[in-house]
Amino acid sequence: MTITVPPYDKLPIELGAPAGSAWGVFDKDGKRDALGTLNFITPGAIVAAKDEIQTVHYAHQARGEFYNGTSYANAAELRTDLTLGIQAISDRGGILCRGVLLDFVRYAAKRGIEYDPLGSYGISLTQIKEMIAEEDLTIRQGDILIVRSGLSKWIHASTPASVGPWEGNTYIGVDPTPELLEWVWNQNLGAVAGDAIAFESIPASDNSSMRFHEAALAGWGMNIGELFDLEQLSIIAERNQRWSFFLTACPLNIKGAAATLANTLAIF
């Protein structure tokens, strides 16, 4: 069973909600939703994902509100309303789904694309679509999209002495254009993740900052995984020539927490 939601160009559905937000989309029986796009990971999506086994909150900046209109007052450290705490994922039973890896390091090497993993290179929507085609993937509702930018490779190749203090304010990642936001929502992804510091490039190609965080976290209730170590995963995927897998995540069960370790496993 799949969930039917409005396309991106029909958002929002709730009067007064920010443009492009999904406030109210997943509400049910008069109860406000706290899971966001994890709702796309239906029991049917989990059952389908088993076939792969063959071997912090960020507010809407203009509004100052979090997912489903939660105010700053109800997201602060001493708040009494803990609805959007990370415990909502544990209460759901963690995350079981299909993961798909888009290996930009591999993609770039094949095309002679040179870039700095410590810079602000933005992986474009066109490149994302080409990686999906090259890896023979079909994106399904409830998938978690994982992008390997090369930062974890750089970290593995570095030493504390060679790196030294780093106070950079430019970050590699997916270029968060309006077209990218529309595409991500319309794929009905359960979540996104990557080895980059912020998943999205900072600054973006139009010099904006944190647009994806605002849309995904505050608008859709979509979790963003950051600084994943994707090196062994990329090796296994390359060896098997398969970039999809069964994925589990067991977040810390801390009531009211805004973020957690992912505790993720990829099972092929």
Image (cartoon, rainbow, N blue to C red):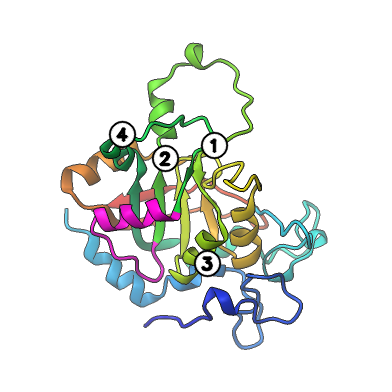
Instruction: Say above or below: 119 vs 240.
Output: above
Q: Is residue 26 visible?
A: no
The amino acid beneath tag 4 is: Gly
* Image disc number at residue 182: 3
| Label 4: how many Cα within 10 Å (few below 14, some 14–19, many 20+) | few
Query: Who's the residue at 72% across and 74% down the image?
Result: 17
Check if mark 2's residue and mark 1's residue have beta carbons within 8 Å: no
Instruction: Say above or below: 92 vs 130.
Output: below
| Label 3: how many Cα within 10 Å (few below 14, some 14–19, many 20+) | some
Front residue (pair 99, 126)? 126
How far apart are labels 3 and 4 at the CA level? 29 Å
* Image disc number at residue 260: none
How far apart are labels 4 and 1 at the CA level? 18 Å
Query: Who's the residue at 56% across and 69% down the image?
Result: 36
How far apart are labels 1 and 3 at the CA level? 22 Å
| Label 2: how many Cα within 10 Å (few below 14, some 14–19, many 20+) | many
Query: Who's the residue at 57% across and 76% down the image?
Result: 9
Magenta segment includes 126: yes
Q: Is residue 200 visible?
A: yes
Front residue (pair 2, 120)? 120
Residue tagged 2: 149
Q: Earlier in the sequence, mark 1 or mark 3?
A: 1
Say which of marks 4 and 1 sits in front.
4
The amino acid beneath tag 2 is: Ser
How far apart are labels 3 and 2 at the CA level? 21 Å
Q: Which residues are magenta?
A: 125-143
Check if mark 3's residue and mark 4's residue have beta carbons within 8 Å: no
Query: Who's the residue at 51% across and 38% down the image?
Result: 172
- Residue 96 in the image: x percent, y percent? 38, 63
Residue tagged 4: 112
* Image disc number at residue 120: 1
